[in-house]
Amino acid sequence: MWQVEIRLRGAARLPEALTTMRRWLSRSGCRPAAFFYDIAGLDRLVRVTFERDDEANSFAAQFGGTVTQPPSRA
């Protein structure tokens, strides 16, 4: 599993950003395994998990995110 993290500055951007991300996912045919966000002060951290690294890298490139591979769960 590959995780993409995208930090958004300012609370007002979250609804618009999530809509844009979901539209991109639909158009590109990418299927995330999980999609969630955290609130940290005025920032929002969006995390999207993919099973395929190519999908994670494409999503990260589109939205300025970073890709990590979470540790496997035993």
Image (cartoon, rainbow, N blue to C red):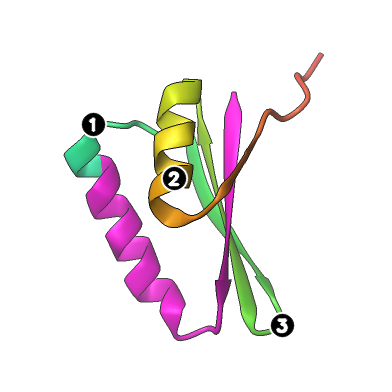
Circle 1: element type: loop
Query: Marks 3 and 2: CB-CB under 8 Å?
Result: no
Q: Residues within 10 Å of mark 2 (few under 14, many from 20)?
A: few
Mark 3 is surrounded, within 10 Å at the Cα level, by few (under 14), some (14 to 19) or many (20 or more) other residues, namely: few
Q: How far, Cα to Cα, is label 1 from label 2?
A: 16 Å
Q: Position of residue 37 (x, y in %)?
A: 57, 60
Q: Circle 1 sits on which residue?
A: 29
- What residue do we see at 43% from left, 79% from top? 13
Q: Would you identify the image quadrant in which residue 49 lies?
A: top right
For mark 3, what is the residue?
Answer: 41
Picture quarter containing residue 32?
top left
Q: Tell me the amino acid under the disc marked 2.
A: Ala
Closest to the observer, 68 or 41:
68
Q: Amino acid at mark 1?
A: Gly
In 3D space, how far apart are the residues under numbered discs 3 and 2 (Cα atoms)?
A: 25 Å
Position of 12 relative to 65 (above/below): below
Dot 3 or dot 2: first in sequence order is 3
- The residue under label 3 is which amino acid type? Gly
The residue singled out by tag 2 in the image is: 61
Vertical relation: 71 (above or below) 28: above
Q: Position of residue 24 (x, y in %)?
A: 26, 48
Q: Tell me the element at label 2.
A: helix
